[in-house]
Amino acid sequence: MSVGIIGGTGLTSLEGLEITRREVVRTPFGEPSAPLIHGTFRGHNITFLARHGHSHNIPPHQVNYRANIWALRHVGVDRVIAVAAVGGLGEAYAPRRIAIPDQIIDYTHSRISTFHDQDLEHVTHIDFTYPYDATVREWLLCAARDAGIDAVDGGTYGATQGPRLETAAEIRRMRQDGCDLVGMTGMPEAALAREAELRYAHCAVVANWAAGMGDGEELSMDEIREHLIHGMEAVRKMIASLS
Ligand code: HPA
């Protein structure tokens, strides 16, 4: 089994990964965000990809999601752990909490969201009723338990366009829609992974209360950074506990 880890904001490299090789993959869809880093981590073959680039300079709406997923598939990854910073909407999703969501609502626009859009012999639809892979979700939840981390099992991830954060009214609407988490990179990444037949799940790290949800104050980037540092530490522990 080969595991792909897509690192998001706060996780641009994986400490402890014994790197064996860096690989620049060319894809029919252009350049991935960064070279793939192959290595081993606690007995697992891992391929790491920094979603926003190694120097964190690619904003969510400019990530080449197709190239990233195509590259992971091309090198033989079968499971993908997509790490992502999010805002929390529901009570249980407080800053620094880890969540393994089970549903998605897509509010993004103008992103190329499919591999199946040109030179088609026939129109292709994928089933996306349950957008995350059940096996990978369970595997992550087990790893969290083994690492002594109280991860939330489930929740609906709302994917927004960014790069700005949301207004308080947008968050109120998302709550009414049933969202528990809000992030900017979950889509079309998850849908492309399904098209590519990769087993994909999100490991979401809550960096802040979503706009208007905390004490009503504006969001502080310093606080977000601080929560993310703690949350990503927990993610590293979880990855170290994967069976
Ligand atoms: N909204 C969208 N994306 C995010 C947030 C947020 O509040 N926090 C971290 N990523």
Image (cartoon, rainbow, N blue to C red):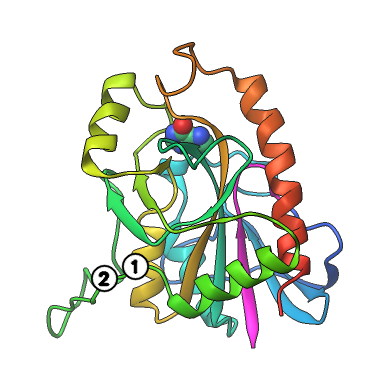
Magenta stretch: give its range.
Answer: 1-12
- The reply to whether residue 90 is visible in this rendering is yes
Position of residue 206 measured from the top left corner of the image (x, y, whole percent): 56, 40
Q: Report the front residue among 42 and 91.
A: 91
Q: In this view, does 230 lie above or below 203?
A: above
Q: As shown in the figure, which amino acid type bears the numbered disc 2?
A: Phe
Position of residue 214 measured from the top left corner of the image (x, y, whole percent): 48, 21
Residue at which label 1 appears: 131
Query: What is the number of the mark on residue 212?
Result: none
Q: Quadrant of residue 179?
A: top left
Compared across the picture, whether 159 is left or right of 242 comes to left
Q: Which residue is drawn at 40% across and 53% down?
A: 155
Query: What is the number of the mark on residue 128?
Result: 2
Mark 2 vs 1: CB contact within 8 A: yes
Q: Report the front residue among 142 and 87.
A: 142
Quarter holding the C terminus is bottom right
Q: Residue at x 45, y 36 (%)?
A: 91
Compared across the picture, whether 106 is left or right of 209 comes to left
| Circle 2 crowding by C-alpha within 10 Å: few under 14, some 14–19, many from 20 | few
Q: Quadrant of residue 108?
A: top left
